[in-house]
Image (spheres, rainbow, N blue to C red):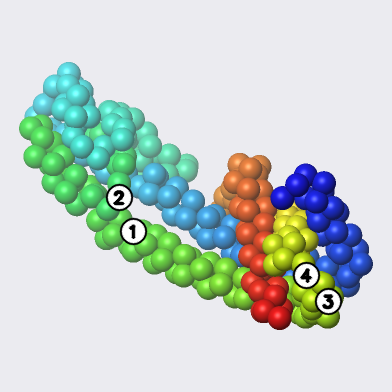
Amino acid sequence: MKLNRLFHLTKEGIKSIFTHGFMSFASVTIIVACLLIMGSFSLLSFNINEMISEMERDNEILAFVDEELSDEEAMDIQHRLEVISNISSVRFVSREEAFENFKAEYDDDSRFDDLPDTTLRHRYAIHLEDLALMENTAADIKAVNGIADVGAELEIGKAIIVVRNVISVVSLIIIAILFVVSVFIMNNTIKLATYSRREEIAIMKMVGASNAFIRFPFVIEGLILGLLGGAIAFFAQWGLYSLVTEKLMTSLVGTLVSVVAFQTLLWPMLAVFLGIGLIVGVFGSSVAIRNYLKV
């Protein structure tokens, strides 16, 4: 296709956006609405997964040192624990520190004043890389010479893993369903817009215009509308997310949960919104006009 013809067809595609203003507006509105629904649910799912991941990182195993070991021998165990697979960090907690932490949980309680600070045992606070392997890792820790006992909340760990897996699967299914529904709605909207121009297409076919010549302006139109809808949806999502998170953080709920800042997802979200808008716009236009080219 020659450059001047390409320029002419592109100009016709842009012009038709304004010529059929109402249908263009309807197409962009549908794209924005569908992307907002998908984006909102995706952000909710992402935040839930982040909270569960934070719970995984905070969950720790306590490895209690044999009381018969000296302080030096107790601290010497650390390098043997660090080589165990699935362990991300190991921190030695002396019996004195453990006792101070224990007393700090009971403010102004004098019941523990007469107890020596050697009442508790030396221990190691251990964080894992993968909570799903907690049971096996706890067994490996207990097998280390000098470790008397291991305190691992296996049931809590299993519960966190189950919740994480369920939320991940459900989120993927719902997002996939929303995507299919959104594409269906947007495609039908574009088909409706094309239907109103069926006579125009028929005339162009009768005067000998090729399918590519007729299709190109529609594809350009769909591309622009898709990108425009994606861009508007992105900024609307940004504003909506910021408004909701601001209200959430200033409420009681904000003291219990943390929310991922939109800025950390800025570029991926922009790429996804523009990408989906572009694909749906171009694909919808190509499919919608296909039937009318069979004249």
Residue under pointer 1: 161
Task: Give the residue type that dot 1 points to.
Answer: Ile
| Residue in view at x 31 percent, y 35 percent | 88
User: In the rendered structure, which disc, 1 or 4, sits on the residue that comes first in sequence?
Assistant: 1
Task: Give the residue type that dot 4 points to.
Answer: Gly
| Total marks in image | 4
Q: How far apart in space, not on screen, are marks 3 and 4 (Cα)? A: 9 Å
Q: How far apart in space, not on screen, are marks 1 and 2 (Cα)? A: 7 Å
Instruction: Give the percent coordinates (x, y) of residue 231.
Output: 75, 53
Residue under pointer 2: 131
Residue under pointer 4: 208
Secondary-structure class at tag 2: helix
Image marks 1 and 3: residues in contact by CB distance under 8 Å: no
183 and 237: which is toward the camera: 183
Secondary-structure class at tag 3: helix
148 and 181: which is toward the camera: 181
Q: Is residue 225 above or below residue 111?
A: below
User: In the rendered structure, which disc, 2 or 3, sits on the residue that comes first in sequence?
Assistant: 2
| Residue in view at x 31 percent, y 33 percent | 89
Q: How far apart in space, not on screen, are marks 1 and 3 (Cα)? A: 62 Å
Task: Give the residue type that dot 2 points to.
Answer: Leu
Question: Can residue 203 be seen here?
Answer: yes
